[in-house]
């Protein structure tokens, strides 16, 4: 069994069999993470550079930890403290790094399509760690893994994606993945934060009613309000957003059945999620973070075969 | 294609291995069993059943060990892993490592690497159904052997499950 692709640019490019292979491999890496020695020698001669042109804590740490658990050598690059600040182009930066014999590139960039561009020009395997408002494939994979861990399967699951769908690469990757694996998807949020033709373009249902959506779903994947990506006013205040789309304990307790709550982090506490929801037994937010390491180990492992190059 | 062991001969070999093992480790005191994926796990479960019968014990666990992440031929192909599950401590225990065929010794070398990431056993002994002695590439030998046989290097020896669910040890020219 091998992946059908040399890079992980987005979920859109993956086959259902690729997704299944990544999830089943991740299950074995999760076992590795429970051992006394939480490390395997699989990538001991592989060098990986983490190119982060945009801020990240969770994703960068998760990738770095995954690489260390696989015994890979790693280089970390933060745009703010590098020659990119002196005006070097993306391609020049990467080619310079590759000339030092690097096998894989993990990249986050604020421009959608940056990893796709890079994949056409360099020989190394590229893993997209988030590009603009396009995709964040490893987040969708770890969300899927967490759902499978809790429910056994993705097929037929009722998943609601709630919040800022317009600016969210997490939403897009999740929608592609859930569609491919046979889950039902409802997106819910204020009309200004949901792309106009999303219902026709992708196989999802749109709802503007939070309570109705929560009553329908088994899993609510709650997204962060991304104030840094909004360059026009899309809702009047955080207070108003919270009033209509914030999830609190009273709302959850009033539903017909208990649901599972997920969030890709970082949480705006008291905006999209209240603390008594985020920290409750219905939340699997910290399990998502734990699973992220295993899922990224699986992706790195499966893409590391240099004979494919 | 040549059948080395039919199902009944295979079951007899498992029974013999169980009785030799119990002779050396009466009641499997301070001893745990670990099968190497995939053939060693198949053999391991049959061995567990046989030991339960011969020693009259009700409960006996089998650890499942997968070497995929420790392979030394990683550069030629990336393989999907099998299930790994060692549900007991191996610290200061005698570990009986079980595999169906001992050939070059590379699998066992990798299996020892895996095992040491789970703790420090007092000793490790190797039990195999079939030993292809003349092809060893590492200084590794088995403590319990079902049968030794002479093969040529490019032949393949495998435990195969028939459609009827019976196990045969098959030698193939590749």
Image (cartoon, coloured by chain):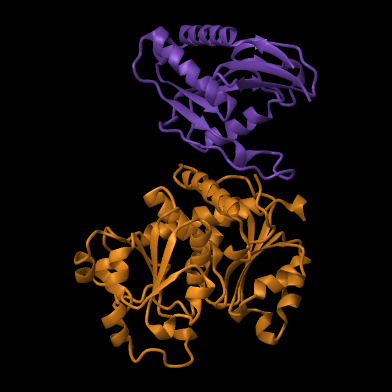
Whether residue B111 is visible, yes or no, is yes
Image height of B27 relative to A185, above or below:
above
- A288 vs B140, left or right, is left
Query: Which chain is orange in the rendering?
Result: A
Along the viewing direction, whichever of A150 and A68 lies nearer the viewer: A150
Image height of A74 relative to A38, above or below:
below
- Residue A130 appears at what percent x and percent y? 56, 71
Image height of A70 relative to B159, above or below:
below
Q: Where is residue A265, by image quadrant?
A: bottom left
Q: How many marks?
A: 0
Q: Residue at x 65, y 44 (%)?
A: A1
Along the viewing direction, whichever of B101 and A248 lies nearer the viewer: A248
The hue used for chain B is purple
Image height of B46 relative to A37, above or below:
above
- Residue B1 appears at what percent x and percent y? 75, 17
Q: Residue at x 42, y 7 (%)?
A: B54
Along the viewing direction, whichever of A98 and B99 lies nearer the viewer: B99
Along the viewing direction, whichever of A214 and A7 lies nearer the viewer: A214
- The quadrant in which the C terminus of chain A is found is bottom right
> Which residue in the rendered view is the most extreme toward the front?
A200
- Residue A13 appears at what percent x and percent y? 63, 63
Q: Where is residue A279, by image quadrant?
A: bottom left
Q: Where is residue B107, by image quadrant?
A: top right
- A200 vs A217, left or right, is right
- Residue B130 appears at what percent x and percent y? 65, 15
Whether residue A68 is visible, yes or no, is no
Q: Residue at x 35, y 78 (%)?
A: A208
Q: Residue at x 63, y 54 (%)?
A: A72
């Amino acid at each position: 069994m091998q992946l059908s692709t040399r890079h992980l640019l987005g979920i859109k490019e993956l086959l259902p069999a690729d997704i299944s292979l990544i999830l089943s491999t991740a299950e074995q890496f999760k076992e590795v993470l429970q051992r006394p020695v939480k490390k395997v020698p699989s990538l001991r001669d592989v060098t990986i550079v983490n190119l982060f042109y945009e801020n990240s804590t969770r994703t960068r740490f998760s990738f770095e930890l995954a690489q260390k658990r696989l015994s890979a050598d790693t280089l970390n690059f933060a745009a703010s403290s590098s020659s990119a600040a002196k005006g070097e182009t993306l391609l020049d930066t990467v080619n310079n790094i590759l000339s030092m014999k690097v096998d894989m590139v993990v990249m986050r960039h604020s421009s959608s399509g940056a990893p796709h561009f890079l994949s056409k020009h360099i020989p190394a395997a590229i893993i997209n760690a988030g590009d603009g408002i396009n995709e964040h494939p490893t987040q969708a994979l770890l969300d899927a893994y967490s759902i499978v861990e809790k429910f056994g399967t993705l097929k037929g699951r009722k998943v609601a994606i709630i919040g800022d769908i317009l600016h969210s690469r997490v939403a897009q990757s999740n929608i592609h993945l859930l569609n491919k694996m046979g889950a039902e998807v409802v997106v819910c949020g204020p009309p200004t934060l949901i792309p106009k033709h999303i219902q026709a373009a992708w196989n999802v249902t749109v709802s503007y009613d939070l309570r109705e959506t929560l009553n329908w779903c088994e899993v609510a994947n709650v997204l962060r309000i991304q104030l840094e990506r909004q360059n026009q006013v899309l809702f009047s205040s955080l207070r108003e957003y919270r009033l209509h789309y914030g999830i609190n304990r009273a709302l959850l307790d009033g539903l017909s059945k208990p649901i599972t709550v997920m969030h890709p982090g970082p949480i705006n506490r008291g905006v999209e999620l209240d603390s008594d929801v985020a920290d409750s037994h219905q939340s699997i937010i910290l399990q998502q973070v734990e699973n992220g390491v295993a899922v990224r180990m699986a992706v790195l492992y499966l893409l590391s075969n240099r004979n494919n190059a | 294609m040549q059948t080395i062991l039919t199902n009944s001969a295979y079951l007899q070999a498992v029974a013999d291995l169980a009785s030799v093992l119990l002779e050396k480790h009466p009641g499997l005191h301070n001893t745990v069993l670990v099968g190497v994926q995939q053939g060693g796990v198949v053999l391991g479960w049959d061995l567990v059943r046989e030991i339960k019968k011969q020693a009259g014990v009700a409960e006996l666990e089998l650890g499942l060990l997968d070497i995929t992440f420790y392979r030394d031929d990683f550069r030629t192909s990336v393989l999907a892993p099998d299930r790994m599950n060692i549900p007991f401590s191996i610290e200061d225990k005698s570990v009986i490592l079980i595999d169906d065929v001992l050939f070059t010794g590379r699998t066992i070398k990798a299996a020892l690497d895996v095992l040491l990431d789970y703790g420090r056993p007092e000793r490790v002994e190797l039990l195999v159904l079939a030993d292809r002695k003349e092809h060893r590439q590492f200084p590794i030998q088995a403590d319990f052997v079902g049968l030794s046989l002479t093969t040529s290097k490019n032949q393949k020896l495998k435990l195969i499950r028939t459609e009827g669910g019976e196990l045969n040890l098959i030698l193939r020219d590749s």
